[in-house]
Image (tube, grey):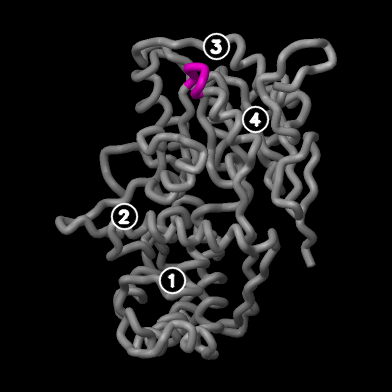
Amino acid sequence: MERRNEGKMSILTAPNYAPAVRRTFENLIEKNQSRPTGQHGKPYIVTDWDNTAIIFDSQQSLFLYQAENLCYRLTPERLAEVIAMELTAVQKAETEELRRDIAVFYRELYSRCEGLGGSEPLAAVQKSPAHAAFVQAMACLYKYPFGYVAECCRIVYLFAGYSLAEVKRLTEESIAREQKIRPERRVYRYTADGQALEAVYYVGLRFVPEQAEFFHKCMENGIDVYVCSASHEAVVQVHAAHYGISPENVLALKIDVDDSEKIMTRVKAGVPMPIKEGKAEAIRRCLLPKHGREPLLVMGDSIGDVAMLTAFSAQGLATNTQHLPSVLAAWREAGRKPEELLIQGRDEIRGEFRDSSESVFLPSV
């Protein structure tokens, strides 16, 4: 292992931790390392997934993969129903033409594409104007400001008809595709009802060596690592496995399945919905009784993580994304001092962390 200048052995050797983050992480491991035989009293940490444990968003990258490759188990009639779910009457009226256009495009694509209702190879269908318009329109619809909870639920309803195993396979396929794409800010545009719509997605998702190392060192030293995410449980489980995190340690959005184990369009009842305040509730209900203590550390990146960042006495860490100003404002509103929140910078152009609290963002044009 590397040695620091002061002669102390380094626990963490990956290069791109912010200095304060590296010190805090190493101290956390040194002070809490243990080998308990039971869970009660065992130390643990909790991390958000998208834009925290990884760079960019697992659910949105899979959404784009589905749209581009027509990975749906939905008839045209059923797709039209699914894309209207969780919308208020006003929201349905506002997006009526956009949703109608999507239904028309999908009906054509469905009738042509093999594996759906047609016989043409996907590669041929992908060259059609209808396919290009469908992807642009879907991207705009699923970035429409319907509200945080609705947005988190609506995107996973597109898995309807798939089994959990099939969603995991799609997730691995989308990860493989993302690794081949350079990090990029991609803008999708569509005009509906005379309104020019625009939606921004970030592609080129990357795993982070520093997070992988830190999680591994925690687990190696008897500190459990949990993920608390508003993305679909199966999607996050696949991603977390790349860091050696057990599926049982993922607290994420659960969707009901039917008698044939196919995914439905209904959030599972009786379990915490880990969205905004629901993340803190998931930790209280699932982890506090199990461990008999609060987490040592909670990590997040957005306003959706503030509740779990501030609900406990744990050390907080925020990755420096475009959401950082709103996170800091909410942190202060919760009575916490700004200097108490660790900040980890990242380089979106290179798709990696930085040894700084400052970030380099992808250009807007």
C-alpha separation, residue under disc 2 versus residue under disc 3: 36 Å
Disc assigned to residue 165: 2
Choose mark 3 or mark 1, whichever is in front: 3
Closer to the camera in the image, 360 or 255? 360
Closer to the camera in the image, 83 or 124? 124
Q: Which residue is mark 1?
A: 92
At label 3, counting other C-alpha atoms closer than 10 Å, the crowd grade (few under 14, some 14-19, many 20 or more) is: some
Asked if 268 appears above or below 137 in the picture, the reply is above
Choose mark 1 or mark 4, whichever is in front: 4
Element type where label 4 sits in the image? strand
C-alpha separation, residue under disc 3 versus residue under disc 1: 52 Å
Q: Amino acid at mark 4?
A: Leu
Q: Which residue is mark 3?
A: 32
Asked if 2 appears above or below 189 in the picture, the reply is above
Choose mark 2 or mark 4, whichever is in front: 2
Q: Amino acid at mark 1?
A: Lys
Lower sequence index among marks 1 and 4 = 1
Residue stretch rendered in magenta on the structure? 219-223
C-alpha separation, residue under disc 1 versus residue under disc 4: 38 Å
Q: Amino acid at mark 3?
A: Asn
Q: Can you tell which quarter of the image residue 356 is in?
A: top right
At label 1, counting other C-alpha atoms closer than 10 Å, the crowd grade (few under 14, some 14-19, many 20 or more) is: some
Q: Which residue is mark 4?
A: 317
Element type where label 2 sits in the image? helix
Q: Is residue 13 left or right of residue 178?
A: right
Residue 271 on the magenta segment = no
Residue 7: percent from left, percent from top:
80, 11
Lower sequence index among marks 1 and 2 = 1
Lower sequence index among marks 2 and 3 = 3
Mark 1 vs 2: CB contact within 8 A? no
